[in-house]
Amino acid sequence: MHVNVDGIGSSRPSSPRGVPRPGPRSPHPLEKILATVGPHSCPGQYNFHCHTTCSDGTLTPEELATQATELGLEHLAITDHHSHQAYGLAQQTIEALVRHGHAVPKLWSGTEINGILHTCLVHILALGYGDAAPLMCYTQGQAAHGEALGAAAVVAAIHRAGGLAILAHPARYRLDFRVLIREAQRLGFDGVETWYDYDMMPQWQASPWICHQVDQLRQDLGLLATCGTDTHSTDLRGR
């Protein structure tokens, strides 16, 4: 199965020490967008983390795409757990809205994948991939098993699919986010979900103290930044 997006490839041509990477990659088109992400990009401009009824969300893909258009989003990725089923349905809605004269967000492919990073179970966002075949074992509605559950294997599959690998909400896990982000960089992750509402406010708001620390560390390590509401409810402006 192929998911059509504009421009495929990873933005990370170099290899983290001790982790081999296949050949040079052309810049990923999403990288230019992520370079502009800041603490106020979400929820009104960008949203690279949200869920639909294709996993554990409340909105259908069609409803989410319509609401994203009404909110004036410029870029959107639906990241259902272990599923990319929503992409095609949301894209059909966006195309219909275009035909009716609406300004719509650019829809990027996405899915949220479980992985083991430094002995810790984490969530990894796959964003902007084109060929979904390498992600087959991660998009069957449940987590992978065995070696495929390792973060290195997940990242390698995302890169083979032409996508970017992002460590989701790094300060929500049992291990310190600094440890996890450094390990993610070593394994070849492309970025970190930098701006996130850890306090789960009624309307999304980046948690300043944690997020600014995450932002500084990811800049020091040369990682991209993303933001997302992690919406599971009926309102894309909150969780």
Image (spheres, grey):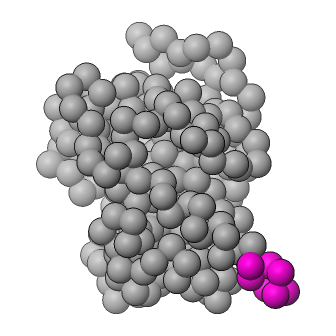
Quadrant in the rendering for residue 100: bottom right
Taking depth in this image into account, of 101 and 13 the one nearest to the observer is 101
Quadrant in the rendering for residue 81: bottom left
Quadrant in the rendering for residue 148: top left
Residue 189 seen by the camera: no
The reply, left or right, for residue 134 in relation to residue 167 is right
Q: Looking at the image, is 202 positioned above or below residue 226? A: below
Quadrant in which the N terminus appears: top right
Taking depth in this image into account, of 123 and 84 the one nearest to the observer is 84
Q: Position of residue 161 (x, y in %)?
A: 57, 33
Residue 230 shown in magenta: no
Question: Which residue in the rendered view is the most extreme toward the front?
Answer: 1
Q: Looking at the image, is 16 positioned above or below residue 51? A: above
At 48% from the left edge and 58% from the top edge, which residue is drawn?
A: 85
Report the magenta residues as a range: 96-103
Taking depth in this image into account, of 29 and 8 the one nearest to the observer is 8
Taking depth in this image into account, of 232 and 167 the one nearest to the observer is 232
Q: Position of residue 135 (x, y in %)?
A: 46, 36
At 37% from the left edge and 25% from the top edge, which residue is drawn?
A: 153
The reply, left or right, for residue 65 in relation to residue 134 is right
Q: Looking at the image, is 187 positioned above or below residue 194? A: above
Residue 100 shown in magenta: yes
Q: Position of residue 12 (x, y in %)?
A: 61, 29
Quadrant in which the C terminus appears: bottom left
Q: Position of residue 167 (x, y in %)?
A: 40, 45
The reply, left or right, for residue 5 in relation to residue 135 is right
At 48% from the left edge and 45% from the top edge, which residue is drawn?
A: 126
At 76% from the left edge and 48% from the top edge, which residue is drawn?
A: 6
